[in-house]
Structure formats: structure tokens, C-alpha cells
Amino acid sequence: MNSFENDIFAERETLFVEVILPLSLAKNYTYRVPFDLNDQIAIGKRVVVQFGKHRIYTALISGITTVPPTVYEAKYIIDVVDAEPVITPMQLKFWSWMTNYYMCNEGDVMAAALPASLKLASETILILREDYNEETELSDKEEIIINALKQQEKLTVNDVSKLLGQKTVYPIINHLLDKELILVAEEVVQKYKPLLKSFVMLNDFYTEEENLKQLFNVLERAPKQLDALLGYLKLQKSNLPISKEQLLEESNCGPAALKALTDKDIFVVMKRPVSRLATHDEEFSVNFELNEGQQKALGQINQYFEEKEVVLLHGVTASGKTQVYIKLIEEIIQNTDGQVLFLLPEIALTTQIVERIKRYFGNAIGVYHSKFNNSERVEIWNKVRTGAYKVILGARSAVFLPFQHLKLIVVDEEHEPSYKQYDPAPRYQARDAAIYLGYLHQAKVILGSATPSLESYYNALQGKYGLVEMKERFGGVQLPNQQVVSISEETKKKTMSSYFSSVLIKDIDLALSKKEQIVLFQNRRGYATILICATCGYTPKCVNCDVSLTYHKSSGKLHCHYCGYQQSSVNICPACGSVHVEQKGFGTERIEEELRLLYPEVTIARLDMDSTRTKNGLQQILNDFQEKKTDILIGTQMVAKGLDFDNLNLIGVINADTLLGYPDFRAYERSFQLLAQVAGRAGRRADQGNVCIQTYDAENRIIKQVVNNDYEGMYNDEIVEREKFLYPPFSRMIFLYIKHKDSHVLDHAALTLAHILKAKFGKRVLGPEQPLVSRVRNLYIKQIIIKADKHTAIQKVKDALRETLTEFNATKEFKGIFTQIDVDPY
């Protein structure tokens, strides 16, 4: 057989591809490849496939074989979407690990990992970009799609297929996305609007020297307009586009002068789309020196990195951990061609860290989180894939980005519960996933916190991680002075003013007299946490969930914080007709109202989920506080996360008991972490800060440990309890949630499943029990807990559990039951 015949034979070889569909399927599907597409397929590329009778999806190739499936006849793939793979082999390995470890399906991971624009399906909606370029060269079929989108606001992929009379429309759509002419939007997503900025240009007529001289003569009698022209000519020397804001700032001419020049056709003002991803042209430079403690910590970290993959940096609040991170990142960027992933618990709440790091690394840095829309996320995704971004700052979803040369992962505030994804699947813990991601890429991982999770600290003490400690604040600033005030004592003495003790009022007065700023912490949002009839005890409850409704004065309604249900407030009891309906409990809204009565002249703001719903709402509140426009900031746990204000000297905790009384084995650990982090916001510059903690239980050991900044004491007490009752880190836990709309059916199903599991795993199985909230969104819930000690082979437990659930869900009697698995549910 000659070489030509060999080539023909290779082309005619029957190939099959295993694909991942963006659906929660227990197994990946296999499709047959048409001969003419053999040379186009590759692992990591997207292909168009039909799944079910009518639905068409873009799926990802995860494997290529010549062996057909044995239990069904493979359908043909319809087309190949990409010229180059969009997913790296390393990402597929990471997805496979996450699927196995967190007991989810690979489609769940794909749905979580990929931006929507990379998950086209037959019902995906396409819209025309408002800033599309009409001069872009188009093929005949592309032009038909664009013209159709001009006539109607949106088209589905199915509509495009009918319009062109062919199934293979995905590559055409992909080309239009690449040419930035269209956008992908889901029905529920707000329509994308490009960020438009006004740029000023001089009319071409005045670019000639003679005409410009005459213009100077004309404008002599309009000095402000002349200032604008001179300012423009000065800025023009940089050869960069001149924005309206730049010109107004440079020339100080005022908007009226600029408008007059525009009306005379001397200036032309044009709106242009600009990237929503902030760019900085300056070269990155680290122009600060580490102090002795930081330098020692940096040396120890590098020393540990020679033999260990993970290092825990335990540094008190304001010890300068961020500067140590920056030096580590600088070493990676300067000495290798590597990338760095910097994880933050909630990126929107850590704006100051983002800005600080951007200042040093300029254009080499990208930011990735859920506040970005689909188009912005794809823009960042591609820049990571091509290596344009060397440093990525991101929330937990950033672990899914297509890194090429990952060398370092920084997990800041590693103890934060925000790193855990609860719904939907995959229910992963980003800190743990980052450690595995580091292992895959052979990258080093640094975990940083002032109050580390017990698991991480335990691993460090056991020698699994390196441990580096920073016990002094940067610049020799003292830790805040903390005092505990007994609410019950003050109530007896009648020295409470509303929810504020005499001690806290005195501290607030002193701080205001010194022009210092104040943060008050109350971990409940809303106005009143419960309404209750004083006559019969009736309490309004959510119609969908087994929880009482919270009264929000801003909306005048009762809200469910689980499903979002709202109803009008109750003034007359619907049960007994009494008008004595009382408000019990209090949230941030109530604190704000009471404080305004006590301090009517003071500027007060509130930072919680309700006040930060808009895209820039949070940023505006923080900017106002940074610029000292706000005197007192009242907030939920948002105020504990990474805020760093130079004029903040007083922290008031309104009621610490709401944290301590939560029924969870982590309640004391989380209380210590949250109170210590809140306290750590005070006095981070020259003066020692003050913290006032109000509580009914002033003798509680956690309160005392927070005041003494005794993390080791808290750890030693808690670790004894954990070992005694076999909680993490001495066991691995899997929570199993069983859900159904009928409570009787659920009870029977949960008991049956628990009986089967106990037969397999014995005493390791606890339950079924009702969780704290036993009905959410009209589904009743039961919980089964599996506790596996350190000597149990956890993978065998997972395999047996998966097999049991498959058989259970396949039973006709339990077809309507929902089961959810949560591995490491903390």
C-alpha cells in the first residue's frame, strides 16, 4: 500500500468521541464522527450534537476512540465549532477530579466552569451588540443573521438554523462572536450594554496650521473655549485618545465651553465602547520595603517551598500579609514565565486589596468574578488562555480558568465560608480545590489568614503544610483595645439607649469628636427579625419555606431570606384579629433608624445585601467611607472582609450572641473568626483602635479569647472537642439531603435510605434528621450524615454511596425524590 493510499485509509477510519454535555448526566455520551470531520476533531474542542429528540448542544470532546458504544448506536456529531481547543488537558483532569471528589457529574462541572458564551445550545439567545461595526466584512450567511437581528431584538440558535435552512450554524455563530458583532444572553440575564465613553477630536479642518492660527484669533474673546483648545493640544502630544473627562480636568474649561466648541463643529465628540476590564499602562513596580517581620516571613515561606507544596501564613490582622503576597508574586513574574492565581473570598467585598495589587502589577493583572457579565467573562477567559494575564484575582470560580503556566496560588482569608459552593453542584470548597489545582500544575500554594480554619492549622501543626507566623502588626501599631459590655447588666441599671450601651455611646461620642470613623456590626439584615401577635402568638411565615418572615422597613414588606417571597406587612393579626402585633429582634435597618434619632447630624450608611444589590452599589458605599463622606457604617459580616480604612478607629459589635448560639459544630470557631476579623478593622494605622463587644454572655470563653487575641487557646479547646466527638479534622463528613414536596413520602424514603446505608456503613451513618430549616421552596428536607474516620478509605465509601443512590433513585417508589450530596459540607 503506497503513502497516498495510507492517507486515504487514515481519513476513512471510523472515529468516536466521548463528549461532556452541559447537563447533569451520570455518564458522558459517545458520538460518531463523520469521515470528513476526522481531521478537525481534538480533545478540548467543542462539537455540535443532538441530544434527545430535538435539543441541540455544543459539547466538549473529552476523549477520542475507535471503539463504538456497546449499549446504543452512536449518533453522528453535526459539526466542529472550534479551530483550536478551548479547554486544556489540565482543565479536563481538574474537572475529572472534582467530579469524583465532590460526587457530582462532569456536566455539572462544565456548566459551572464555562462562561455562557462557550455553552451554546439550541435555545441560546443571540442579540446584536449595540456597538457593532457595520464595516466588518461578512459572509452571505453571516449577513443574513445580522440583518435578521436588526429587524428583531433576539434570535435563538434554533431560529438561526431555520433562517439558514441548515443544522450546522454553530461555526457561523462562533465567527460572529469572534468578530464581536453579537452577544450571547440568557433570558434571565439583563441585556448587555457596552461601556461607552465620550472621546474628543479636533475637526480635521483645524489640523492645518493656517486654519488653527485663525481659530486662535477667533477664540481670543472666549477665554474658556481657548483654554479647552489649548488643553486638547497639550493632551494630543501623548498620541492617545482624549476622553471628555481628561480634557475637562486638564483645561478646567467647564462643560459649557466644551459644548460651545462642539456646537461650532470645532470639536467632534464621539462615544466609543471601552473595555469594562480596567487597564493600567504603567509598568508594574514594587516600591516598598518589607519590615523585619515581613522579610522573615517571606524567607521562611521560600524555605518551606523547597520541600512542601502548601504553606499556611498565620498573621494577625494588619500584619502586612498582602505585601508579602506581592513580593512572592513579583518573584514569579520576574523570574519565570508563570501565572499566579490570587483567590479572595468575595471579590466585590475586597476592592481595596484588588486596587492595591493592581497598582503594582498594572496590565499584567485580570479580575474574574460573578459580577461580570458573560461577555466580560469570555474576554478574561481568553486573556488567561493566551497568557496575556500573568496574575488573576478571583473569587472561587476562578479555579476553573484555563491557566497555561500556573506557578503560585494565594488563598487569602482561607478560613472564609464564602469559598464553599452550596448550590448548585458541584458543591466544592475552593480552598481545597486550589490545593489540588496547585498539585496538577506543580504550583506552590500559600494559605493566608489571621484566624485560620481548624483543619488548615491542624495540617500545619502535623507537618503536612509549612507554618509561618506574623504576630505583630505592620509599623508597630498595637492591636485594638477590646472591652466587653454586658447587655443584661446595663439593662438592669437602665443605662441602655435603645440597642446601645452607655460604654458604646461614650466611645461613639469620643470618636466623632476626634473626627474618626466608626463601624457597627450586627449580623442580621432587615428591620425586625420576627413579627408576633402579643395576644395569640401568631407569627407570619413564608408560604414556601418553614421560616418566619423578616420585616424590611425600606420596602414596607415581609421578606423570606431563603426563597425571596414577599408579602405586605401585618398590622392586624389574621388569626385572632388583635392589633397588638409586636416587632421582635432587630437587624441593620433598625440599628440605622435608632442611630439616626440619637445622632441626627451624623452621616450614616448601611452595608448589607439589601443596600448593595446594584452592580456599583457596594463600591459607592465603600468609596464614600474611604473619602470620609460617611461617619458611621452599619453592616452585616460584609464589614469583616478585608476592609482597610486609615481613619476607622472604633468597632461596635451590637450583639455577639447571635453568632455563638448557632446550632453547628463550627459555631464557636466561626464566632471567633468573625469577631476577630471585625475587631481587626480598627486602628490599622498609627493610633490604637477600640472595639466594644456587647453581649448577654460576657463570661463566654470565645468572647474572652477574642478579647485576648488568643487563637491558640481557641484552637486547643476546639480540637479537643472535635477529637472527642469525631468531627473534622478527625473525620470526613458527607451530608445527604433528601427532598420531596410531600412530607409523608419524604419520611418513608429517608428512613428506607438510612436503613440501606446503615447496613453498609454501620455507626458511621447518622439520621435521618430534620435540618434547621426543614422546608425550602415547597420541598420538605431530611438530612443523613455519613462520618468516616481517618482510617476509613473515603473513596470506597463514596463509590458505595454512589452505587446505593443510583439503585435508590431507580426504584419506582422513589422516582419523585431529589437527593443531593454535599462532600465536606463546611
Image (cartoon, helix red, strand yellow):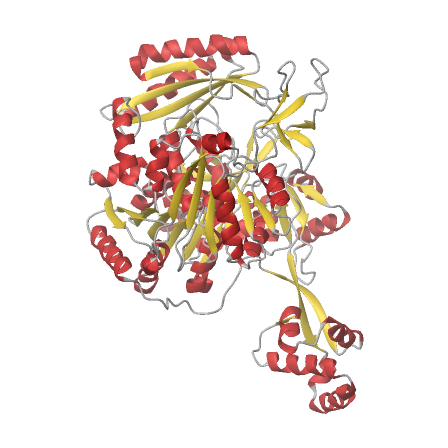
Image label count = 0
Outermost residue, right side: 264
Quadrant the C terminus occupies:
top left
Can the viewer see residue 446 in this picture? yes
Can the viewer see residue 169 in this picture? no
- Tell me which residue sits at (35%, 66%) in the image: 288
User: Which of these two is toward me, 151 or 470?
Assistant: 470
Q: In this view, does 641 lie to the left or right of 466?
A: right
- Tell me which residue sits at (22%, 47%) in the image: 308
Residue 355, above or below 508: below
- Point out residue 265 in the picture as x, y percentages from the top left corner: 78, 77
- Point out residue 349 in the picture as x, y percentages from the top left corner: 50, 48
Residue 16, above or below 737: below
Residue 426, above or below 640: above
- Point out residue 815 in the picture as x, y percentages from the top left corner: 52, 14
- Point out residue 630 in the picture as x, y percentages from the top left corner: 58, 54
User: Which of these two is toward me, 505 or 818?
Assistant: 505
Residue 630, above or below 525: below
